[in-house]
Amino acid sequence: MASDVFQQNKLTITGAQALALDQARGRLVWVVMVLMMGYLAIGLRMGDLTLLRHKSTETLAGNKDSTPVAKPLRGEIVDRNGNLMAASLKMASVYADTTMVEDPAALAKKLAAILPEQTYADLLQKLSSGKEFIWIQRDVTPKQEYAINALGNPALSFQDEGRRIYPDAGLTAHIIGYTDVDGNGIAGIEKYFNKQLVGAEKPVQLTIDMRIQHIMHRELGAAVKKFHAKDGIGMVMDVNTGEIIAMVSLPDFDPNHIGDATDEQKFNRATLGVFEMGSTFKLFSTAAALDSGKVHFSSVFDASEPIKVGRFKISDYHAKKRPLTVPEIFIYSSNIGTAKMADSLGENSLKNFYKSMGFMTQAPVELPERGAPLYPSPWSEVSTLTASFGHGIAVSPLHLIRAASALVNGGIMPMSTLVRLEKRDNLSLTPEGPRVVSAETSNKMRQLLELVVADGTGTKAAVAGYDVGGKTGTAEKNIHGSYEHNASLSSFIGVFPIQAPRYAVLAILDEPQGTPDTHGYSTGGWTAAPVVANVIEQMGPLYQIPPDLERTHKDIEKEMSAYLKEFKEGSTLASLGTDH
């Protein structure tokens, strides 16, 4: 009997345990199912974020509902000596999924207190947009990032981005250019090498020497201020390699704050601007005449009277009213003599020579901002006369300094460049490129350029100890189809050392005003030549070009007389006219 009761109780307990176990199993299954559903939901969400939303980088306006993809940092840009000119810093940008914002007004108020660059109204508009992705602000500071994180709002997220930094601000703005908010190159080297710079480990090295860039920027800026010029242009080029050592266009701008820059400031006058260069073009018409073999130093052209062709009249700024030899034409900067010399070459000869000098195509350089020359079409007899002294044809300053380099380096047209190549490490390299004039013509042009600085219109470009040659230029500006007597472009192109040229230095001032120091003159010899002299004076020692302190002014005059045998004894070498 007792055993039966025990057995019955045992069965009752066992049945209760089984029921409890079945219930536990059921609950466990439900828990596992819930967990699996949770993991599945998380997986789907992650897939949505990584696969569906990482499609494109959004702009500040937020036109697409897509989460940005982190781009690799943009590569560095350095000068010829490795000095940093542009770099990218990793910074956070904050964006929002506004579908998760419960109270846009409250969140906008909190963000406005953290982000002073943003207004409450703008933030409220963004947070109320209903977009799954919209930028709140790009490139927030670490302090701002910490404060936003502290809000603990799941609608706000961060994306690491690269902010472009330009250490020298406006000093190289027209060379380097700038990028947009998404890191895409918009101008200058940034645009030209846009694809190569994305994620680049090796920097893009330029030919620019920041030391010379500083010097040119300072001296040109001082001249613009002194002569109340509208703007200024300065360049330095290695005449053998075509490397651009310095390039300044004023006014400039700060690429770190591109939104504050005007179109006038962003305009690169050195490569994009084209101008009638005036008397500096006599370099090329004179070279064309000498290289033709039809004209020699002893050739004489009558400059007694102005030239009249139809309604056109060509006259001299300071007329000598007598026949002039070729050196005199160059020294006195005679428009009449230059025009007659060019005319003697025959139909289209000057046009073809200008074409060979690159004056009818864009000048080569690694910048998207390049100006197309303007020249007469069709080319008439009058075109030959006026273009011989730089009127009726407009080129960029880069065209001018490149072509001038060819005339003094032995006659080879260099490939102008801003990018440093290893093969250009040797500064004494023999020029490479097409021959445009003979070595003999190049030598004669060096002699004429030295004479201009020694005793001609460019005496203010002289530098003690350094043999400098050059040519002045003053061109009346063509405004609305007519030339304005009181609006001129004054320039000077200098070369040193002139007997074995290495560098060409160009300075241009737009509408400079005369001062008491210049006796009211605003021409190139008074305004631009001193800029070139100041640059050469500082550049020579930096580049370890030894000065020749023993070579005196009398020595130069003696040398001039030697290769100007055509001049009679007692000629006017020491009393030459004022610059034109």
Image (cartoon, helix red, strand yellow):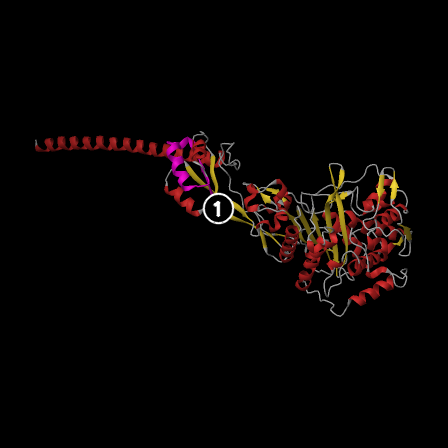
Number of marks = 1
Camera-side residue of 188 and 50: 188
Q: Mark 1: which secondary structure?
A: strand
Return the residue found at the far bottom: 550
Residue furthest out toward the left: 1
Q: Is residue 372 left or right of residue 89?
A: right
Q: Which residues are magenta?
A: 92-117
Residue 335 image position (x, y, % from top left):
83, 48
Question: Residue 107 magenta-drawn?
Answer: yes
Residue 456 in view in this figure? yes
Q: Position of residue 20 (x, y in %)?
A: 22, 32
In the image, residue 477 above or below residue 62 = below
Query: Which residue bears the numbered disc 1?
Result: 91
Q: Is residue 170 left or right of residue 500?
A: left
Q: Is residue 19 magenta?
A: no
Classify mark 1: residues with Cα within 10 Å, few (<14), some (14-19) or many (20+). Answer: some
* Position of residue 119 measured from the top left corner of the image (x, y, whole percent): 44, 36
> Which of the 4 image quarters holds residue 104?
top left
Q: Which quadrant would the N terminus be assigned to in this image?
A: top left
Q: Position of residue 432 (x, y in %)?
A: 77, 54
Q: Is residue 239 visible?
A: no
Q: Nearer the viewer, residue 281 or 163?
A: 281
Question: Which quadrant of the structure image shows residue 44?
Answer: top left
Above/below status of 378 relative to 169: above
Question: At 37% from the left edge and 40% from the top edge, which residue is drawn?
Answer: 151
- Front residue of 383/268: it is 383
